[in-house]
Amino acid sequence: MFTVAALYHFTRFDDPAALRPGVLATCEKLGVRGSLLLAREGINGTIAGTPAAIHAVLDAVRALPGCGDLDWKESRSAEMPFGRMKVRLKREIVTMGRPDIDPCARAGHYVAPERWNALISAPDVAVIDTRNAYEVSIGTFAGAIDPDTAAFREFPHWWEENRERFHNKRIAMFCTGGIRCEKATNFVLGQGVEDVFHLKGGILKYLERVPEAQSLWRGECFVFDERVSLGHGLRPGRHELCRACRRPLAPQDRNRPEYERGVACHRCAHEHSPAQRGRFRERQRQIDLARARGQTHLGTGRG
């Protein structure tokens, strides 16, 4: 059983490139896999390994400048959910494309998972899902607004087009682990909204702490690793990943005529050329061959 740790922390790194070799070496030495992003605004990512290895890497991350109070979410996986370890340098650890946004300077009010239901049930609260449309499609909070964005960088434009809908409303936002909604709160506060809240620890912490019988969550939560989705209690969900378009597929989606494992699904069957589908078909053949030999093909993992 592997431990999976989803983490992020907004802080100010003067030289992210100087931190990368040490972080990568620590992960590789301990056999930890996954993906971490480093930028001037902090660190973000998901990693998996043995419990001892993960906690050792988290100790190393907490030793980075400004990361002493790092928070993270843990779950379990019966199989290693990543193919390799990557530490990448980025302009932003979650891309909004607005250089003036600074969650280190100001963010909305954190709301603990145990208090979230009361907040989002209030009549003067508008609840906004800051995730992408394909994530929202498999699960969200009852009554939440879906901005129907394809990427997080579309959120500011959506808000500017819809802000009048939220006049005299308190705003409650959420996302998978907390990073996107935290950054979005800084943006919305800068737009003049006074009462802005976000779910501390994101959906993952809510599903971990709030009993299913009391939950306002509907469906499953998309996660960025080979498990694809999680349910209440962070139990593995029913979804798989379309290897062509990277969107989640429910069991019934895999029975549709457009579906070909590793090649196409009903959402992307007309998005790729015959040449692309041929490459996907060969990739799936190599994955199957590696699996038959008891090996891990790098095309399998999402890390």
Image: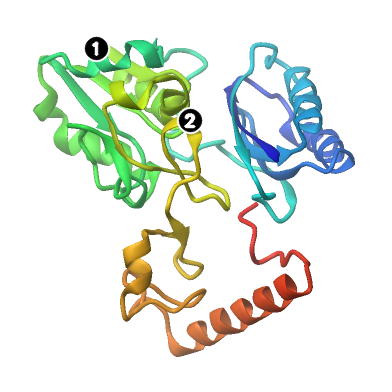
Colour convention of the picture: rainbow
Q: Which residue occupies the foreground of this view, 286 or 161?
A: 286
**Residue linked to disc 1:** 118
In front: mark 2 or mark 1?
1
**Residue linked to disc 2:** 177
User: For residue 303, which numbered disc appears in the image?
Assistant: none
Q: Secondary structure at mark 1?
A: helix
Q: Residue at x 48, y 40 (%)?
A: 95
Image quarter of the N terminus:
top right
Residue type (three-letter) at the residue carrying disc 1? Ala
Q: Which residue occupies the foreground of this view, 299 or 66?
A: 299
Q: Is residue 208 left or right of residue 291?
A: left
**Disc 2 to disc 1: CB gap under 8 Å:** no
Residue 154: quarter of image: top left
- Mark 1 closeness class: few <14, some 14–19, many ≥20 residues within 10 Å: few
Residue 109: tell me if it is visible.
no
Residue 224 image offset from top left, x and y in percent:
53, 47
Q: Which residue occupies the foreground of this view, 120 or 161?
A: 120
Tell me how far mark 2 sits from mark 1, CA to CA.
Answer: 20 Å
Residue 220 image offset from top left, x and y in percent:
37, 42
Name the residue at the right extreme. 29
Q: Is residue 47 left or right of residue 128?
A: right
Q: Which residue occupies the foreground of this view, 88 or 6?
A: 6
Residue 14 image offset from top left, x and y in percent:
71, 24
